[in-house]
Amino acid sequence: MKAGTFLRSTSLLDDTFFEQTIIFITEHNEKGAMGFVVNRLFPRKINELVEFKDCAAFPLYEGGPVDQEHLFFIHQRPDLIKGGDQVTAHIQLGGDFKAAMQYINDNTITEKDIRIFIGYCGWDDQELEAEIAEGSWEAIQETEVSLF
């Protein structure tokens, strides 16, 4: 399992938060794994959150059940958004969120460049591997998913 992998939940996860989800793994190391649900829109847009009431109406995704008090983002514009961590050749995790919001507000970047999440998915060391081994998740090809 490596960063940049996509996982699809199986029927073993039906009736849980993860029913019919696709996860994008952004980190995987000796501490565990981190990723985001990429196919579940959050019911409100970012401008409907109090702190962002003056921002453009931009979609949010339900990234996962962990730390839903914070926003996280992935993008493919390291030329504009500095400070991100490389996940794949084309995708960065995080970076200068203030700059990202400025570029969203002035339409320099769009949904084709960035995806913002509320919360994330996290697993301790070997926990995700155990869930894959038991059949809860299956790896899928990047071509089966449209991130941007």
Image: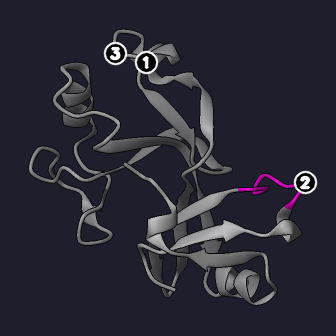
- Residue 126, placed above or below residue 8: below
Q: Distance from label 3 to label 1 (Cα)? A: 9 Å
Which segment is the magenta one? 14-20
**Residue 15 is one of the magenta-drawn residues:** yes
Q: Position of residue 30 (x, y in %)?
A: 50, 88
Q: Residue at x 28, y 44 (%)?
A: 113
Main secondary structure found in the magenta portion: loop
Which amino acid does the dot numbered 3 rest on?
Answer: Cys
- Residue 66, placed above or below residue 50: below
Q: Circle 1 is placed at which residue position?
A: 51
Asked which secondary structure carries label 2, the reply is loop
Q: Circle 3 is placed at which residue position?
A: 55
Which amino acid does the dot numbered 2 rest on?
Answer: Asp
Q: Residue at x 52, y 65 (%)?
A: 144
Residue 33 in view in this figure: yes
Please tell me whether mark 1 or mark 2 is closer to you in this view.
2
**Residue 42 is one of the magenta-drawn residues:** no
Q: Residue at x 60, y 71 (%)?
A: 7
Q: Distance from label 1 to label 2 (Cα)? A: 32 Å
Please tell me whether mark 3 or mark 1 is closer to you in this view.
3
N-terminal-most mark, 2 or 3: 2
Q: Are marks 1 and 2 in contact (CB under 8 Å)?
A: no
> Left or right: 70 with respect to 14?
left
Quadrant in the picture for residue 57: top left
